[in-house]
Image (tube, grey):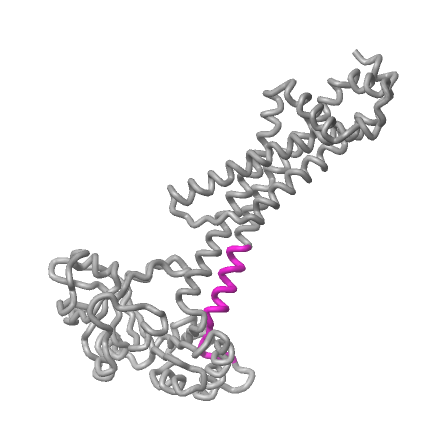
């Protein structure tokens, strides 16, 4: 018996009870749609994070204070007083280093006229816009002279500008107050959007780090140093050189832990990528349970079909059908059932991904690999769960089958 003939008989048999066929396919439809949607969510999140890391610059290196224990107290990132501005100056002299910006951050209430806003105050150096590839939209960034003299000048992020001034207003030259001290607005940064960790990068104010140290916080140490290597290929080499230099400057003995942390964007991207991959696998596994349930439903219905069609099987065997023909017949029916459900599930998975992206503004990305995998898995479910009923049908005794009422 040809495959086309077997397929025609299978479709005809499935059409005899359309409601039962539709309900059986429902498990596969839900399972495949859920898998595609969950994988699209995970892949979209991963792609979004990678794009944000790429926009920040793969050759960026973050040196943070902390990462050691003192008197039984663990000093976390940025909490120790081990980094000083001189460390940044020496790092700038290392081979392969292009830009360096010392940093010291704090939060504070900003006042402009009768408006106020609580935001992140980031003390930094003049190279930060070059390191972050972050242009100034209005006005200008502060100058090396401003850093040397600890001038009270500020550059606003776009969100902070909108909160303190009207969105169409020009705040350049206006006076704002930070910790009750007057600062002159020098410029406004272009919109940067969210970071890979979900933080709003535009909700910030940039001021010279020397101003934060001397006039806002009254300290002499910095929290971090942002470094840009001359090329992405030299990032790891430069990071190792920075670590060796700081260990020497801080007089850390061999075997003792570092009192600082050196992280590259590649490392952070790898960690976040692994996290999103784990989450994607978890979501896909949970959704895959629906496929398992759908496969069990197919087996159940095919076993019922074998029982209902026992006499039909006996007649076919009596007129010359072999066990192999009967087995192929029921196996094709099971695979057809699962593949039809898989095809409809793929459609609903694509629709669901689009709806989530449009209405919830979550990043989604449906890959061809996920669709192909879903289709193959649908066929595999049909073969796996359809084999036993098909084998059972093929092993029926023709004489007993003809006597079956």
Q: Is residue 56 above or below residue 333?
A: below
Q: In which quadrant of the rendered view does residue 226 lie?
A: bottom left
Instruction: Tell me what residue is drawn at x 11 percent, y 61 percent.
Output: 113
Of helix, strand and loop, which mostly describes the magenta segment? helix
Q: Residue 343's x, y, as percent?
A: 58, 36
In the depicted view, which residue is nearer to us: 335 or 247?
Answer: 335
Give the side of residue 310 with respect to residue 271, left or right: right
Asked if residue 130 lies in the magenta stretch, the reply is no
Q: In which quadrant of the rendered view does residue 136 lie?
A: bottom left
Instruction: Tell me what residue is drawn at x 71 percent, y 34 percent.
Output: 385
Residue 71 in sight here: no
In the depicted view, which residue is nearer to us: 5 or 353?
Answer: 5
Q: Residue 160's x, y, as percent?
A: 23, 60
Q: Is residue 202 above or below residue 11?
A: below
Q: Is residue 331 above or below residue 273?
A: above
| Range covered by the magenta-colored residues | 257-277
Question: In the image as oriented, which residue stretches furthest toward the left?
Answer: 113
In the depicted view, which residue is nearer to us: 220 or 171?
Answer: 171
């Amino acid at each position: 018996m040809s495959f086309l003939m077997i397929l025609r008989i299978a479709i005809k048999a499935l059409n005899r009870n359309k409601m039962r066929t539709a309900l059986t396919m429902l498990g596969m439809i839900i399972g495949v749609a859920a898998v595609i949607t969950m994988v699209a969510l995970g892949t979209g999140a991963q792609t979004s994070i990678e794009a944000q890391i790429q926009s920040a610059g793969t050759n960026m290196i973050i040196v943070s204070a902390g990462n050691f224990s003192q008197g039984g107290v663990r000093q976390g990132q940025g909490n120790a007083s081990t980094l000083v501005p001189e460390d940044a100056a020496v790092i700038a002299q290392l081979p392969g280093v292009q830009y360096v910006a010392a940093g010291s951050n704090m939060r504070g209430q900003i006042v402009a006229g009768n408006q106020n806003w609580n935001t992140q105050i980031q003390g930094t150096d003049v190279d930060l816009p070059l390191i972050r590839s972050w242009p100034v939209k209005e006005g200008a960034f502060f100058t090396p002279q401003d850093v040397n003299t600890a001038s009270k000048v500020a550059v606003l992020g776009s969100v902070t500008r909108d909160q303190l001034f009207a969105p169409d207003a020009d705040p350049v030259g206006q006076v704002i107050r930070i910790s009750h001290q007057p600062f002159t607005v020098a410029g406004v940064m272009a919109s940067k959007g969210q970071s890979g960790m979900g933080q709003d990068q535009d909700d910030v104010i940039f001021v010279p780090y020397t101003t934060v140290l001397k006039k806002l916080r009254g300290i002499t140490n910095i929290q971090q140093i942002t470094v840009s290597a001359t090329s992405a290929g030299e990032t790891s080499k430069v990071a190792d050189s920075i670590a060796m230099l700081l260990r020497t400057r801080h007089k850390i003995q061999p075997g003792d832990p570092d009192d600082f942390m050196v992280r590259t964007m590649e490392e952070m991207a790898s960690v976040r990528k692994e996290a999103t991959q784990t989450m994607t696998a978890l979501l896909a596994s949970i959704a895959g349970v629906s496929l398992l349930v759908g496969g069990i439903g197919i087996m159940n219905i095919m076993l019922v079909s074998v029982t209902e069609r026992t006499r039909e099987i006996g007649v076919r065997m009596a007129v010359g059908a072999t066990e192999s023909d009967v087995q192929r017949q029921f196996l094709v029916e099971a695979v057809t059932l699962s593949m039809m459900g898989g095809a409809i599930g793929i459609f609903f998975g694509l629709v669901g991904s689009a709806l989530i992206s449009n209405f919830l503004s979550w990043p989604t990305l449906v890959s061809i690999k996920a669709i192909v995998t879903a289709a193959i898995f649908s066929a595999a479910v049909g073969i796996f769960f359809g084999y036993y009923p098909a084998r059972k049908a093929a092993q029926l005794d023709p004489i007993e089958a003809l006597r079956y009422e």
